[in-house]
Amino acid sequence: MEVINAIGRRKAAVARVYVSDGSGKIVINRRDLTEYFPSPILQFVVKQPLSTLNVTEQYDVKVNLFGGGFKGQSEAVRLAITRALIKINPELKPALKAEGFVTRDPRSVERKKPGRPKARKRFQFSKR
């Protein structure tokens, strides 16, 4: 199998994923998954699509990741891996969609408005 690439986004994070046949190694920005995401919860999030399909040991995943924070980055990688797996075998899509991995989460930070301290917060009102 040739290398399959896909892209995933979440909040401000962008993940470019390259999936190829292999032994189950996940490398993010030239670092191992456990080194890049020390938290076991974030490691679990990244591996979710692979473990759902029981193909954790079949593919090597190389990721270029930038922007956002830890949580956004891990969810961007999850979406990108999901999209790559669907490119490899389109019949897997219903199983991944049932888990909610196929849907891009559009929520991001609302911009700050002029004349306000934050996006929606207002300065304290003074009657007198």
Image (tube, rainbow, N blue to C red):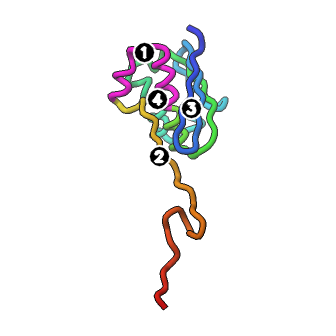
| Residue 2 placement, left or right of 75 | right
Residue 46 at x, y = what percent?
Answer: 48, 32
Overall secondary structure of the magenta section? helix
Kindly indicate whether the residue at mark 2 contacts the one at mark 4 (C-beta within 8 angstroms): no
Q: Which mark is in front, 3 or 2?
A: 2
| Residue 10 placement, left or right of 54 | right
Q: Residue at x 60, y 29 (%)?
A: 16
Q: Which mark is in front, 4 or 2?
A: 2
Q: What secondary structure is found at the residue carrying circle 3?
A: helix
What label does residue 33 carry, if any? Answer: 3
What residue is shown with label 4? 47
The amino acid pointed to by label 1 is Pro
Kindly indicate whether the residue at mark 4 contacts the one at mark 3 (C-beta within 8 angstroms): yes
What residue is shown with label 2? 107
Residue 6 at x, y = what percent?
Answer: 56, 24
Q: What secondary structure is found at the residue carrying circle 2?
A: loop
Circle 1 packing at 10 Å, graded few (<14), some (14-19), many (20+), is few
Between residue 35 and residue 105, name the one nearer to us: 105
Q: CA distance from mark 3 to mark 2?
A: 25 Å
Q: Which residues are magenta?
A: 78-98
